[in-house]
Amino acid sequence: MKDGRPHALTVVLDGTTGAAARQARALGAFLRDGVSRAPEADAGPAEATGITLLFYADERDKERLVRLAPTRDVHLMRVPPRRPDLMAAALEALAGDAGAELFVFAGGPLATELATRLACRTGGGVVTDVLDAAIEEAALICRRGVYSGHLTGRVELGPRPWWVTTDAGWCDAPPSAPGEHRIAADTAWLAAEDDTGAAAPLADVEALESPSTSDLETARFLVVAGRGAGSRQGVERLEAAARRMGAAFGVTRPVAMNAWAPMDRLIGVSGTRAAPAVCLVAGASGAPAFLWGIERAGFIAAVDTDEHAAIVAEADVAAIDDGVAVLEALADLVAGEPAAPPA
Amino acid sequence: MRIAVGFKVTPDYEALRASDWARAAAGVVDTRYVRRVLDTFDESALELALRLRDARAAQGRETALAAFSVAGREADPFLKTLQALGFERAARMDASGAAAATGAGDEGDPGAGAGLDFAPSATAQVIAACARELGADVLLLGCRSGPGDDGTIPFFAAEMLGHPCVTQVTAIEPAGEDGLRVTFVADDGPVRATVRTPCVLAVGNAIVSHLRVPTLNDRLAAREAAIAGLQPADLDVDVVAAVGREPVVLTCLAPVDRSRAGVIARGATPAAKARALYEEHLRARLARL
């Protein structure tokens, strides 16, 4: 690295947009609980031996961003925002330094781009959405979901450097305690643009308003409608039942894809990961990508016409019937109860 | 503007039973009996390409559409449909040499692309070669596809082509003769930006998710159109060597156990089942919320 001391582990944090806190949380948890080392490969705790490469765009953000870094040593690198091409060029230079062998990113679109492009440029291997990793003497062993989440695959990376992005589930792990930090370097990667005249890949960038999914993220009681609702009307009836019961309302991907409900209601890998105390699922088959969105629920009750549907075994309790009819009857019962006194 | 859309025909994994997945520990995923479907993100990409062509035509701009798949003959019905919808060029790349060399893929007839299932770098090499062959200004792909599902292929292809790449694209509009106004989901939320061409765009959760259906007249008009059969060697790609160079190797598969108690609430009618759910399982839990 540029401070003259090689680091085997480099953690990459993007502070140029608003995603740094979420990324730092995932990276800290992954280093703490998701990476193991074989005895022959042991080099001490990752937090002590690794370094965080922290991209930032605004001097005023530096102090706040450094506090997020999951390692003690931090290499600050100033780049313009939304310039993955410049970030990749900076990483390529760092990857050429002796000793750099494992680069870890928090999962997301930018992470996938940087890790893939750098693996291509350096001849190393890339694995995305990693559940856990084991560093062995000659290889990195990772587990990740494959076959749409139906299976877990174990993959082996041989040639270094290794480029790894974490599974989205690491964002929900308990945060690590804040530690001390040391600025190992503070540099800027702006020269590439001046030297090569390379145009920015994106122009006239406009951040759009993000639809709020906070009700789904914080819901204690959640109703989810699946394709078995049958139609937009069926979904609307389920939403009305959810409202009568005082529950938040989400849908599976096929429902959103059919435009029976807005995309921001989507529960699952492509949407919101909820953690309700009670979750009612109506007419969903139980595809892994959906189940990921509710697997942290304290209690799951499912209604489906197919007793062999995966959701039946994946629920704590299930009823085999039409989801709309059962949930409307259930709403009558719940709405008929007197409201609980305030705690 | 020339737009090439790469798509994949996959087994409908949701149609497999739990027992099929349980056999995966033996390294076998038998998909012979399930139907083949367009990958969901690829289907969005194909429809977005058609809508972009229509929007550019309304501005008096010409757009040439091409579609290709790295596949066996299972892709032909989809390619014929795309020809009927106005994709002027349709190509199928036969990479069966990779399957034969690796012995990888699903049990039974794995299709001609199965040897590339867990070889994203080699797959991207083939895709990039197809894009060059088709002269694509815009290479449109789904953001990820099974069974590997790792989302790297668009970026590998972009890197090999020397193009910028945007993933998680949800909408594409014309922006002048050679530009595109692209809406996508970045790490910090939705963004709209102008992307210069040539470029690679990888489609994510677009609201436009279903491919339109051609009319009978469209199908009749396109019935004589030929599907171009390509071989990797025709495009100077040694697919077997590319797979052999993959730096990441899948070493084993394991089923994921997500089961809970699965107690069945019984009753003669929906109302009776609702009452059983409520009285025996939900009432106390909801009261504690």
Image (cartoon, coloured by chain):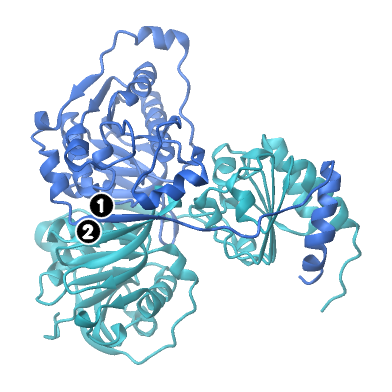
Please state the horizontal and vertical placement of residue A36, each as a whole percent of the image. Answer: 31, 77
Image position of B206 with respect to A69: above or below: above
Helix, strand or loop at disc 2?
Answer: helix
Identified by mark 2, the residue type is: Asp
Please state the horizontal and vertical placement of residue B22, each as a whole percent of the image. Answer: 45, 50
Nearer-N-terminus badge (2/1): 2
Chain letter, cyan in picture: A
Residue found at x 30% / y 46%: B195
Q: In the rendered image, which residue does mark 2 sit on? A: A85
Please state the horizontal and vertical placement of residue A334, each as a whole percent of the image. Answer: 85, 57
Residue found at x 75% / y 53%: A242
Q: Quadrant of residue A227?
A: top right
Image position of A133 with respect to B153: above or below: below
- On screen, residue A236 versus residue A174, left or right, reads right
Residue found at x 57% / y 43%: A256
Identified by mark 1, the residue type is: Pro
Q: Quadrant of residue A89?
A: bottom left
Q: How many marks?
A: 2
Q: Badges 2 and 1: C-beta atoms under 8 Å apart? A: yes
Q: Residues within 10 Å of mark 2 (few under 14, many from 20)?
A: many
Helix, strand or loop at disc 1?
Answer: loop
Which quadrant is the C terminus of chain A positioned in?
A: bottom right
Q: Quadrant of residue B188?
A: bottom left
Task: Mark yes or no: residue B234 visible.
Answer: yes
Front one among B272 and B119: B272
Q: Residues within 10 Å of mark 1 (few under 14, many from 20)?
A: some
Please state the horizontal and vertical placement of residue B223, each as a whole percent of the image. Answer: 34, 9
Figure colour of chain B = blue
The numbered dot on residue A201 is 1
Q: Chain of mark 1?
A: A
Residue found at x 81% / y 46%: A328
Front one among A272 and B55: A272
